[in-house]
Each structure stands twice: as structure tokens, then as C-alpha cells.
């Protein structure tokens, strides 16, 4: 069965006024000792040139960790793609884990990004073994933009929705900073799947594990809620992540996707209500349905809940306690404000966007919610994003963080997914520095579960407690000296008091001495090669270089750029002496030729040697 409950903010509506109120509706599949459902899973992994080096290494290690966590009744397939789409593991039960992992270890980076081809092959494999009693899922991982095959985001998003209707749901995972977040989020939303931003290459295994935990916890799917609003009630906005449509009666039909064991599915609604008199005021009927696990099989269940608000005097409304829902509603309200602010900023309305975020900060503080550490962290995030938007310096990394935080907060209630972000705060480079702690308190910024946290290092303090700290000056590994720290009202976290300085101890390298500089400018001269590719220096990292691949084109060997942002079909001036079919190279710079439709390799050329997972325990 599905349990429902609801609450409002304010908890009591004011009589005789037309006002906006936020309603929080909760849905939970109440299924005791639900058995683990078997998985029918396809991992689709980008192996294009931009994944070369550490990204592909960690992605494949993450895939191996998935194999370790699956069981014999699960079905697994693995697809990799660059120009070509290759099947590493055809659909099969996970009975020989060593063989599956050995197959993964033979994968190497290649060319350009045929995202659609890889993803559709994964969908095909899941469809082959489709079983409504299993969780049927494609996990699509990429670090770049689709530049081969179907590239139109609208087509890919619509197709993701179509595949979901056929029973194949897609979860998308964006790796590092080069992927198209609008495409991956759009596909996940259309498919009612999940989306993850893997910000640091070494957290890939952790993110994969979060998704596997989620899949094992699915106890209900296709949760739909129809709102039958009473007279005088208007739906202003939906605060949760959902697909919304209208039925023949003009009522809103809200699709919320999956239900997870032990986890509430939240639906936040912003309503406009005319509260005429003191007493109970019916606001709506909720008609809900879902496919849930009952007696070890999937069954359809449905129900109706009457949503009734309490109307009181101004005094009753002012003093009514609503703390039980303030935190959950605040998370949704914060996420919605971030989404709205980004949309405004990208339409040139930066001042309006900043105002929305700063007004919300003031509202949260006025409600005393800054005494809750999670909301205090969100306030720091809001201030960070408001400042970046106002200065028009949000950037690629900031945009991805903001959209990821919005998606997770509006979709799930897992605290390990909320507020993730590890981008270095720009203001750390301009901070005043000291070289000893003196009478102050020493702090350090560390990365925990995809979040930058600040802890106390000085003796006499609880090193396990978090410190509320400005987001704009956080950077993993950085140390600080502050005048003092004090406990929050409930004693659960610390607050900084006084001046904040960055600590740079004598004899230690200062890695935050200046903003990260781009690669030094090359001479701009065309590259010259030695006698053969074997004579080239080698590297196993791309860093700020450009990745080039040698491919067979008819009877000729030609070089092409496979790094994102370049035209993969353009010819390239590249030393013939070092060309070997399939080989990858890293060059300092790529210039556009005089004809405007070809490239010239410039500066030093290195042969790219791919790291292997074979000997890693």
C-alpha cells in the first residue's frame, strides 16, 4: 500500500485573506521486508578521446565495482562507444565476475563521441531481456558532447521518454566538466531516471554505488498524482521534479517516478487559497496510483486522499508551529529558486536572479533555519551563486553544480546527494594569508562524499563536527586560521567568528597562490616529428593539450582531432613520419588552417600511452 500525509506552511491559514501557501505531500510505499529486485542493467561508457587517461581509468574501475556488487540473478551488458559502438559484455547473468572484469580491462580510449549509438545499443540489450519484475535500466556515462550519430538534444530527450514507456529507463552520469548537462538532465527527466554529476574522477565508483543502492531500493514505479482542486484554490507552481500533463477534465496529472524503500517521495505545491472562514477548508482530492511490489510481484495500487487545511485567526496563524515540514519545504524552495535564478540569468536578467536568491537567504534566516546545518550550508551556496551570477562569473563548473544541486533536491530526499560541489571557490586566491596559527583556530577544507566540508584541526575542538564556512573560499586541501569558532544553538556544528585568513606554513608549497593559469602559449609553429612514432616522448595525461588520433581513410592514414570542441571531419596537417593507425597523440596546440576548414598541429607532439586497470588491486 501507499501511505500519504500532508502539511502546510504556514501551518494555519489566515482567515479572510487570499494568500499563497506551500503544501508538502508525502508518499511512501509501505511494504514490510520487501525483497531485493533483480536487475537488468546495461552500462554504456564513453571511451572517446576526451575520456583518455584518468577519466576512462576511473570509469572502468567504477564499472568493475558494479560487477562486484551484482548477483547471479542479475543481467548485465556493457557497451562502449567512440566513433564505433562495441559490445564489451553481451547481456548475460553475472555468474563469472572475473571474466566480466577482464573484458572491461581491455577497453581503451578512442575517437569521437557517438553517444546516441552507444546509448541505443544499451537500450536494445535491456529490451532483449526485459522483465517487468526486474529493474530494467541503462546507465549512460559520458564526459563530452555528442558529435556523431543523433546529436539533436530534443530528439534524444524525446527518445528517452519513448524508451521509458517501453519499460527501459535511463540514468545519466556526467563526468568532469565537458558534458552537456542540459542534454543529460533532459534525458533523465524524460525517462524518469536519475542524473549524477561526477565532479571528480576518483568519485566515479562512489556515484555508481549510490545508483545501485537506489535501484535495489525501488519498491514502486510510475507514481502518478492527479490534483482535483477545490473551488477557490489555484495551483501556482510545482516545487518537485515531475512531469506534468493535463487530463480531459483539465486537472494536473503529476508523474513522480519511482518509490524507494524507506524513503518518502515528496511533492511540493505552491497554492493560492481564499480562506473565507475559521475552521477546516478542503483544498483538493489527491488521486494517486503506482506499480508496487506486493507478495513478490508487481501490482497496481491506487487511492484517494482528501487534503484539508486549517483556517484560523491572524494570531493563531502567526504562532502555529510548522517546524515539522519547514526543512523539507525549504529544500524544495531553495532548489526551485536556484532553477529560476539560473533561467533568469541566462536570459540576461542577472539583477533579478540575484535578488531572488538573496531574498530567499533573508527569509530562511528570519525563520531561524540557519540554525540547521544543512540549511546553513544551503545559505552559503545561495550566497555563492548569487555573487557569481551578479558578477557574471558563474562559469561552466558553477552551472553544473547549481543544476546538479537543483535536480537532486527536487528529486530525492537522500542527504548524500544534496548540496554536492567540489569546485574551488574563486575568492580563495585573493585571501589574506598568515604563516602561523598563533592564538587563532586552525581549520582545513576536505572532500567528503562529493562535498567540500570544513573541519577544526586545533586541539580542544570536536574534529568530527562540520564548520559553517563561506563557499567562495573553500578548496580541497586548503587550511585556514580564524579568530574563533562557536557552537550552533543545538551544538551540532561550529560557526566561524572574526577574521578568516588562509594558512601557508613556511617551507610548504602554496597551491592556491594564484588562479589556475591556462597552458603557456605555444610558438604557433607547425609540429615537426622524429623519424617514427617510437621516437616520440610519451605521456599518460592530456591536461591542457589537444588529443589527436590517426585513422585509416581509404588507403591513407590521416590525423584528426578527437578532443571536444573541434570538427572531427576536418583534415589536419600532421607529421607523416609518426602516423600509425589507431595511435593517440597529445599536441600543444591546434590552429585553424588558412583555408578555414582544416587544422594544423603546433608545438610538441607526445604519444599517448593509456593507463591500464589490469594490475590494480
Image (cartoon, helix red, strand yellow):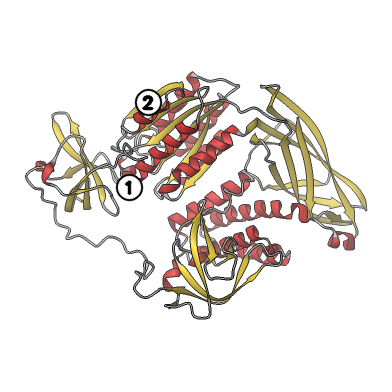
Q: Secondary structure at mark 2?
A: helix
Query: Upstream in the sequence, badge 1 or badge 2?
Result: 2
| Place of residue 586 in the rendered image (x, y in percent of width and height, measured from the top left) | 23, 48
Q: Residue at x 24, y 62 (%)?
A: 520
Q: Secondary structure at mark 1?
A: loop
For residue 503, side relative to residue 316 (left or right)? left
Q: Percent from the top left, x then y, of residue 136?
A: 54, 26
Q: Is residue 26 above or below residue 363?
A: above
Q: CA distance from mark 1 to mark 2?
A: 36 Å
- The answer, for residue 422, to whether it is visible in the render is yes
Q: Does residue 183 appear anywhere in the picture?
A: no
Q: Residue furthest bottom?
A: 439
Q: Specify whether 190 is left or right of 487.
A: left
Relative to the observer, which residue lies in front, 103 or 426?
Answer: 103
Provide the residue designation for mark 1: 565
Is 417 on the left or on the right of 572, as rendered? right
Foreground: disc 1 or disc 2: 2
Q: Is residue 436 left or right of residue 252?
A: left
User: Which quarter of the image is occupied by the C terminus?
Assistant: top left
Image height of 268 relative to 430, above or below: above
Residue 349: numbered disc: none
Amino acid at each position: 500500500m501507499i501511505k500519504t500525509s500532508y502539511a502546510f506552511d504556514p501551518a494555519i491559514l489566515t482567515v479572510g485573506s487570499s494568500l499563497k501557501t506551500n503544501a508538502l505531500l508525502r508518499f511512501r510505499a509501505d511494504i514490510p521486508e520487501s525483497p531485493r529486485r533483480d536487475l537488468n542493467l546495461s552500462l554504456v561508457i564513453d571511451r572517446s578521446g576526451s575520456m583518455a587517461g584518468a577519466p576512462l581509468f576511473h570509469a572502468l574501475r567504477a564499472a568493475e565495482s558494479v560487477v562486484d556488487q551484482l548477483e547471479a540473478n542479475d543481467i548485465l551488458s556493457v557497451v562502449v562507444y567512440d566513433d564505433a559502438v562495441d559490445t564489451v559484455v553481451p547481456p548475460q547473468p553475472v555468474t563469472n565476475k572475473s571474466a566480466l572484469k577482464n573484458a572491461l580491462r581491455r577497453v581503451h580510449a578512442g575517437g569521437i563521441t557517438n553517444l546516441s549509438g552507444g546509448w541505443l545499443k544499451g537500450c536494445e540489450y535491456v529490451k532483449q531481456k526485459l522483465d517487468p519484475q526486474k529493474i530494467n535500466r541503462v546507465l549512460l556515462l559520458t564526459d563530452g558532447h555528442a558529435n556523431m550519430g543523433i546529436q539533436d538534444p530534443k530528439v534524444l530527450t524525446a527518445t528517452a521518454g519513448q524508451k521509458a514507456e517501453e519499460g527501459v529507463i535511463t540514468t545519466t552520469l556526467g563526468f568532469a566538466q565537458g558534458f552537456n548537462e542540459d542534454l543529460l538532465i533532459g534525458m533523465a527527466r524524460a525517462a524518469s531516471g536519475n542524473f549524477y554529476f561526477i565532479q571528480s574522477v576518483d568519485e566515479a565508483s562512489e556515484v555508481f554505488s549510490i545508483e545501485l543502492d537506489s535501484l535495489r531500493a525501488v519498491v514502486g514505479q510510475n507514481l502518478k498524482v492527479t490534483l482535483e482542486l477545490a473551488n477557490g484554490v489555484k495551483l501556482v507552481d510545482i516545487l518537485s521534479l515531475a512531469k506534468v500533463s493535463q487530463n480531459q477534465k483539465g486537472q494536473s496529472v503529476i508523474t513522480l517516478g519511482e518509490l524507494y524503500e524507506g524513503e518518502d517521495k515528496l511533492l511540493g505545491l505552491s497554492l493560492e487559497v481564499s480562506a473565507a472562514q475559521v475552521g477546516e477548508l478542503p483544498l483538493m482530492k489527491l488521486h494517486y496510483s503506482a506499480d508496487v511490489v506486493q507478495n513478490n510481484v508487481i501490482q497496481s495500487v491506487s487511492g484517494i486522499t482528501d487534503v484539508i487545511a486549517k483556517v484560523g485567526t491572524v494570531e493563531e496563524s502567526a504562532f502555529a508551529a510548522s517546524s515539522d515540514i519547514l526543512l523539507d519545504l525549504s529544500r524544495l524552495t531553495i532548489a526551485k529558486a536556484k532553477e529560476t535564478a539560473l533561467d533568469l540569468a541566462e536570459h540576461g536578467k542577472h539583477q533579478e536572479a540575484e535578488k531572488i536568491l538573496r531574498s530567499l537567504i533573508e527569509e530562511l534566516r528570519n525563520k531561524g533555519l540557519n540554525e540547521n546545518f544543512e540549511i546553513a550550508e544551503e545559505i552559503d551556496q545561495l550566497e555563492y551563486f548569487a555573487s557569481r551570477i551578479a558578477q557574471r562569473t558563474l562559469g561552466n563548473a558553477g552551472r553544473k553544480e547549481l543544476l546538479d544541486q537543483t535536480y537532486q533536491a527536487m528529486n530525492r530526499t537522500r542527504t548524500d546527494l544534496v548540496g554536492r560541489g567540489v569546485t574551488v571557490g574563486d575568492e580563495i586566491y585573493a585571501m589574506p594569508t598568515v604563516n602561523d596559527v598563533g592564538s587563532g583556530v586552525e581549520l582545513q577544507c576536505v572532500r567528503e562524499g562529493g562535498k567540500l566540508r570544513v573541519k577544526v584541526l586545533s586541539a580542544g575542538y570536536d574534529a568530527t563536527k562540520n564548520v559553517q564556512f563561506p563557499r567562495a573560499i573553500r578548496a580541497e586541501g586548503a587550511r585556514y586560521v580564524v579568530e574563533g569558532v562557536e557552537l550552533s544553538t543545538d551544538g551540532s556544528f561550529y560557526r566561524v567568528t572574526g577574521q578568516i585568513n588562509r594558512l601557508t606554513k613556511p617551507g610548504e608549497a602554496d597551491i592556491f597562490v594564484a588562479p589556475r593559469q591556462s597552458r603557456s602559449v605555444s610558438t604557433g609553429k607547425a609540429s615537426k616529428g622524429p623519424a617514427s612514432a617510437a621516437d616520440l616522448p610519451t605521456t599518460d595525461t592530456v591536461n591542457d593539450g589537444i588529443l589527436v588520433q590517426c585513422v585509416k581513410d581509404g588507403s591513407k592514414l590521416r590525423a584528426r582531432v578527437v578532443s571536444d570542441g573541434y570538427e572531427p571531419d576536418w583534415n589536419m596537417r600532421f607529421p607523416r613520419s609518426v602516423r600509425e593507425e589507431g595511435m593517440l597523440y597529445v599536441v600543444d596546440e591546434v590552429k585553424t588552417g588558412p583555408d578555414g576548414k582544416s587544422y594544423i598541429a603546433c608545438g610538441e607532439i607526445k604519444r599517448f600511452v593509456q593507463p591500464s586497470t589490469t594490475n590494480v588491486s
